[in-house]
Image: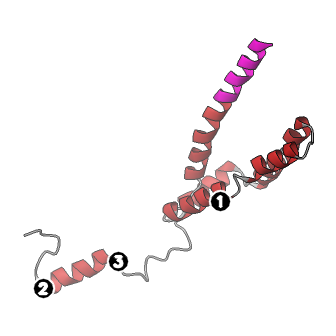
């Protein structure tokens, strides 16, 4: 029985070691151009805001005297919710096409950047702002 536990521990470790880098890769490949930092911050916030809920449910059920197997089975709801969201995801080719397009939330033509201001000042004053002398 001890070797079965070792086998499942090894399997669990390989699956978790594969899951987290793959999740980061899929997320980074599906971001629209120009919104990488904004959406990465939102993703980190969203992934951490609910992380306490499954252990809380299990602990409350265990401390209430409910058998531990039912506490573990109650966590299945979170996997079902995740599976439902994965089923709603668009095909990967569509996601990659949309990610390669410029974001519609960013309108570069109307915004003046600091580089534009520096170029105008350099042209008017005849000096190089980036020169450290």
Task: Mark 3 and mark 1 in contact? Answer it, CB < 8 Å.
Answer: no
Q: How many marks?
A: 3
Residue 125's label in the rendered image is 2
Q: Secondary structure at mark 2?
A: helix
Residue 64 is marked as none
Horizontal side, residue 30 vs residue 83: left or right: left
Residue topped by disc 1 = 46
Which numbered disc, 3 or 1, marks the residue closer to the eye?
1
CA–CA distance in space, label 1 to label 2: 48 Å
Q: Residue lying at the far bottom in this picture: please name it.
A: 124
Task: Report the span colored magenta.
Answer: 1-14
Q: Which residue is mark 3?
A: 113
Mark 1 touching mark 2, by CB under 8 A? no
Instruction: Say few, some or many: other residues with alpha carbon within 10 Å of mark 1 (under 14 / 14 to 19 / 20 or more).
Output: few
Q: Is residue 73 above or below residue 34?
A: above
Counting from the top left corner in percent of width and height, residue 43 is at 60, 58
Q: Residue at x 53, y 65 (%)?
A: 38
Relative to 120, 10 lies left or right: right
Q: Are marks 3 and 2 in contact (CB under 8 Å)?
A: no
For the view shown, which residue lies furthest in the left direction?
Answer: 133
Q: Is residue 6 magenta?
A: yes
In primary-sequence order, the first of circles 3 and 2 is: 3
Say what secondary structure mark 1 lies in. Answer: helix
Rendering quarter of residue 85: bottom right
Quadrant of image for the N terminus: top right
Reply yes or no: does residue 128 show up in magenta. no
Rendering quarter of residue 72: top right
User: Quadrant location of the C terminus?
Assistant: bottom left
Q: Where is residue 35 shown, x and y percent of the image?
A: 52, 65
Q: How is the image coloured?
A: secondary structure
Which is more N-terminal, label 2 or label 1?
Answer: 1
Residue at 65% x, 28% y: name it: 13
């Amino acid at each position: 029985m001890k070797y079965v536990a070792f086998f499942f521990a090894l399997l669990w470790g390989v699956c978790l070691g594969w899951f987290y880098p793959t999740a980061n890769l899929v997320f980074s490949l599906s971001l629209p151009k120009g919104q990488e930092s904004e959406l990465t911050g939102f993703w980190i916030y969203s992934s951490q805001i609910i992380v306490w809920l499954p252990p809380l449910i299990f602990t409350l059920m265990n401390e209430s005297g409910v058998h531990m197997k039912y506490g573990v089975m109650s966590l299945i709801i979170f996997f079902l919710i995740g599976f439902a969201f994965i089923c709603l995801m668009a095909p990967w080719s569509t996601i990659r096409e949309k990610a390669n397009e410029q974001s519609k939330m960013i309108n570069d033509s109307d915004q003046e950047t600091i580089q534009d201001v520096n170029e105008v000042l350099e042209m008017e004053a005849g000096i190089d702002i980036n020169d450290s002398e």
